[in-house]
Amino acid sequence: DFGERKGQAERMLGLMDVFLKNDPISLQKDILHHVEYTVARSRFSFDDFEAYQALAHSVRDRLIERWHDTLIHFKKEDPKRVYFLSLEFLMGRSLSNIVINLGIRDQFADALSQLGFDFEVLAEQEGDACLGNGGLARLSACQMDSLATLDYPAVGYGLRYQYGLFRQVIVDGFQHEQPDYWLNFGNPWEIERVHITYPVKFYGTVTDEFLNGEKCKVWVPGEMVEAVAYDNPIPGYGTRNTINLRLWAAKPSDQHDMESFNTGDYVDAVVNRQRAESISSILYPDDRSYQGKELRLKQQYFFVSASVQDIFRRFKDTHKKFDEFPEKVALQLNDTHPSLAIAEVMRVLLDEEHLSWHRAWDIICKIFSFTTHTVSPEGLEKIPVDLLGNLLPRHLQIIYDINFNFVEELKKMIGLDYDRLTRMSIVEEGAVKNIRMANLSVICSHTVNGVSRLHSELLRTKLFKDFYDLWPHKFQYKTNGVTQRRWIVVSNPSLCALISKWLGTEAWIRDIDLLIGLRDYATNAELHQEWKMVKKVNKIRLAEYIEAMSGLKVSLDAMFDVQTKRIHEYKRQLLNILGIIHRYDCIKNMYKNDRKKVVPRVCIIGGKAAPGYEIAKKIIKLCHVVAERINNDNDIGDLLKLVFIPDYNVSVAEMVIPGADLSQHLSTAGHEASGTGSMKFLMNGCLLLATADGSTIEMVEEIGQDNMFLFGAKAHEVVALRKKGPTLKVPLQFSRVVRMIRDGHFGFEDYFKSLCDKIEGTSDYFLLGADFMSYLEAQAAADKAFVDEERWTKMSILSAAGSGRFSTDRTIQEYAENTWDIQPCRCPF
Ligand code: 6GP
């Protein structure tokens, strides 16, 4: 009865303070409470890690309050939600980000210092959550931050891998991979939802049955596992809104293979059950290449199926008619990895909700949007038909049916152009028959997004040209961004304070366009002083890290020149190393007097190579042998140093980026879909040396060509250059440095032979030779600018001032307005 329930609610409110308090005493009590009762250590004796755990739990309590309020608010308002499906989220550490977004960092820092602890020291205790590979995965994390901050009703869905991306260990200059069993010490940022579970089916057969006189398909699965939800609340900044990132873990299902319990050995049967967990055990470490492995396909379907069940459950809580589905649901496919969701939604609508094909298809066409993150056709996923048909027999049927209808329609539109029909078909015929997941995604989505303007152009004219000609209206682009909360406020507190001081407000943390205001002070001497001071502080931090890690002492007067990102041939770390060898060679051949003019450099390279990517691993080794040679050459001293930073991840990036003077983005034009690393450097007032690729082209528009060091062939020139092949003249300087490697100047000449072969003559696919002189000129221009401190500082300020366009706040707002059609839904305070 209502009166009674109201009474109970009031009593509960009375028993519990409405919100946890944030004054120093309450915070200290809370931390000690968690030391004693959550961590189960005595409040009189606990170390930094235990203090971190207790701190994290106190923060988590506050996070949960807002999260509950947001979920209740969303439920009440019932807005259209976007469901962001991604197989990868590279979250890094959470503590600092969360307390800053909740606006309680300083309060916690004060409370801790009174207990004798330093907030920053405790924050360092946290390990990274590396549930992703590179750009795509970190973008998802930044986008979650923006979705929460901009009050959008969003839910992220992904997989809770037990092993994140491998840890990179360098032994004798070679990369070794070690497992990242990141959950070993518990994860205070997740909430296990033992009651939110869904069965996920695999294998089996499909039969025709009759239901109320209608023929329908029934899938009798051969295996069943349970998906358990782990919720990761994501707080917005300057808002109460806290959204959910729901990651699924696999557990054995009670219905899993009961037969073997009845017939076989009990112990074997239990061990068999445990295998179910392997579905969510490991993140595949290869970005941009697809191997058609069954486990990977299982992962994709597992997370898609659980998410789709969750989405239907939420919808059906408040709605009866499926025609309303598109008014309440937007499904975002982050690359093709979740694209089985298309077949799964179709299957549920047809086989479980018994909608007609026509009605179901109508819904599909209104709810899906697809973003691709790659440029190369080889990067597009293909699933062997046999594999798919065995694991998901009903889904294969549905995909065939979608394709049949599509091809029939297509014939009506374009006639019997068999080449084009073959290219556009979802099914690829050949020795091995494949399902083209990109074609499926394009055909079934209402919008196809690229991640920069250039990328979108390449999609329209190359990768998806046939589809663009058919449906030009589907194609859009949203230039990527990064969140300034993580990449300035958390990682560069001194710059954050400086920007707020000069802009006279902290509002830029939510409204990044305000950064442009820094332009007014680009030549202000006082700002210059403070700006340089901030850079110095960050360079000291980075130099200390380098020394602790490698024993190498580097000069703070040198230019810190950084290239950190996944190792790929197209990203051309090799070009960087060849440039360094050239620089070394030049210095060695200089008269002593001329050496005074050399701008000292600390060259920093970092990044992981996919475990099976041999050439990338050779590049890492080359970096080490060259470093060994240069760093131990007393004749060179501080003029040149080369450092490889191992195990580059989000938390290492947070330290490296603010300390960089120059950062390099060297991809052969037309190969980097967008690039987001450059955006982080830019925000931190670091100058870019880059090719006209991906989003860099848009940066030139914001920052101005004079404030960057651009070089190399343009995207439209690359094809022609490649065609020239053997007639292309490579500069002597290039041949000379390659020869030095071949001749064993750095040792290991046999090992590096294949690397050298790849960049000489006709096989120089990524055009290192063709771009080499232009690269050296850009480097010389950077040197020249660096010695003119005033000019450099001005360029640095203008870089940060012009970085506003590259916030995920802008990206997400564009998605919300032009792709998902969703509105903010702000939780009242
Ligand atoms: C990356 C792209 O290579 C990069 O250019 C882009 O900035 C980033 O995605 C975010 O859009 N792609 C991947 O990381 C990937 O795995 C399949 O692509």
Image (tube, grey):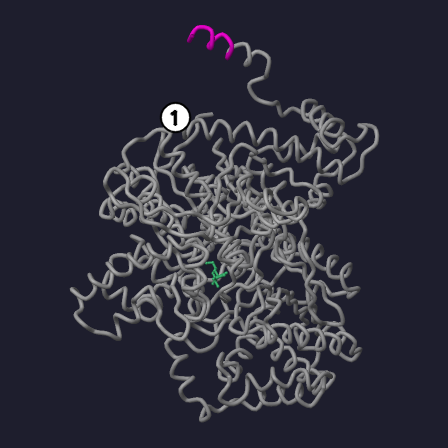
Q: Is residue 662 magenta?
A: no
| Residue 494, visible in the rendered structure | no
Quadrant of res 674 = bottom left
The furthest residue to the right = 45
Nearest the viewer among 154 and 239 is 154
SS category of the residue bearing label 1: helix
Residue under numbered circle 1: 76
Nearest the viewer among 81 and 577 is 81
Q: Where is residue 690 in the image (x, y as percent from the top left)?
A: 50, 69
Magenta range is 1-9
Residue at left offset 58%, top offset 89%: 735
Quadrant of res 437 = bottom left
Q: How many labels does the image show?
A: 1
Secondary structure mainly formed by the magenta segment: helix
Using a 10 Å C-alpha cutoff, classify the residue at mark 1 as few (fewer than 14 neighbours), some (14 to 19) or many (20 or more).
few
Nearest the viewer among 555 and 64 is 64
Residue at left offset 31%, top offset 59%: 400
| Residue 128, visible in the rendered structure | yes
The vertical placement of 200 against 399, above or below, is: above
Q: Position of residue 343 (x, y in %)?
A: 36, 52
- What's the residue type where badge 1 is placed? Lys
The furthest residue to the front = 263
Q: Where is residue 686 in the image (x, y as percent from the top left)?
A: 56, 60
The furthest residue to the bottom = 727
